[in-house]
Amino acid sequence: MENPVRAGSQWIMRAARWVRADFDGIAALATKLRDVPPVGWEGRYHFRGEEELTLRYLLALDALNFCFWPPSPATGEKWSVPGPGGGRLTGYFALAYALRQVAEADPSFFAPAALRRIGRDRVRDALGEIPLLPWRVRALQEVGEALFRFGSAQGFFARAQGSCRRLVELVTAHLPLFRDAALYRGREVLFHKRAQILCADLAGTFGGEGPGALRDLGWLTAFADYKLPQLLAAHGALVLHPTLAGRIRRLIPLAAGSPEEVELRAATVMAVEELTSTLRAGGRSVLPCEVDWMLWNLAQDRLPIPHPRVLTPFY
């Protein structure tokens, strides 16, 4: 069965007016990626322990894995947490490490009954002054409801039967904040960024074994967020309408679900598909999700243009 994210993104790009792919830019970026080593699972910041707790941790992690760019409401600065060995972590790795510390110090935080009734103070105690707190509280409550309904995280993930497609369908059916969809020209289109990345995180955490033995990782598309289009545009793989490019450069937020935002995400998905095909044609066997990881890691370096700003719980 075709991934609806891939099919919907193809359709969007046939009608797009704000963003287009540049195939010369994609080819040049593919040349640069040929020498980039594959990205292994980053285990320094993630929790890995007893299976049930690890699965609860992963579901909570990806429920909260969105929109780290707004300033902290308390400090007015980028949200961060102390990292191992000194220094501070920001963004996704800050979230992964903060939740790891909670899992190691207080596993009861991830109990279904505790998550169902979790409040702002408890989340703030665990994560500090993370932005968009109301959405994050709701996301954890939804995790608690799902775990309570299925009896355990192991019971929940077992329903996927080793399939990314089934897991995405399961997560988006039972956790509303994972239902990453938009209306474009009157048609619903899906992106399912966090539901898809949960599959990759599951495979990475368990090394492709046990709960991480997913047989259809190639079904996944890129995880359309705000860092990948930044990098793709910086390398000339995406070309933005001058009005849109100007808004992004001036740090003017885009409306979630707007044509500009939807086209950026669809173009990201299709650019990664083209990069994957180009790399395969050159003899490098990669999956779209692996190309996504390579690009996301490159996007952590300083880039000449800012990332699009969208207030959303979806990425």
Image (cartoon, rainbow, N blue to C red):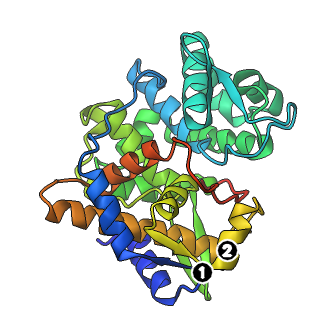
Label 2, secondary structure: give it. helix
> Separation of disc 2 and disc 1 at Cα?
7 Å
Kind of residue indicated by mark 2:
Leu
Residue at which label 2 appears: 244
Q: Residue at x 87, y 32 (%)?
A: 74
Residue 215 image label: none
x and y, in percent, of residue 171 in the image: 49, 52
State the residue lying farthest toward the right: 74
Image quarter of the N terminus = bottom left
Counting labels gives: 2
Q: Which mark is residue 18?
A: 1
Q: Do the residues bearing badges 2 and 1 touch, measured as CB atoms within 8 Å?
A: yes
Mark 1: amino acid: Trp
x%, y% of residue 104?
54, 13
- As drawn, which residue projects farthest toward the front? 304
Front residue of 184 and 283? 283
Give residue 203's position: percent from left, percent from top: 32, 39
Residue, far left: 283
In x, y percent, where is residue 220?
35, 58
Residue in view at x 51 percent, y 31 percent: 56
Lower sequence index among marks 2 and 1: 1
Q: In the picture provided, is 12 more to the left or to the right than 49?
A: right
Is residue 134 shown to the viewer in this render? Answer: yes
Q: Can residue 152 be spotted in the picture?
A: no
- 26 lies left or right of 69: left
- What SS does tag 1 mark? loop
Q: Of residues 206 and 80, which is closer to you in this image?
A: 80
Rate crowding at label 1 as few (under 14), some (14 to 19) or many (20 or more) other CA atoms within 10 Å.
many
Q: Residues within 10 Å of mark 2 (few under 14, many from 20)?
A: some
Above or below 66: residue 127: above
Dividing the picture into quadrants, the one containing residue 243 is bottom right
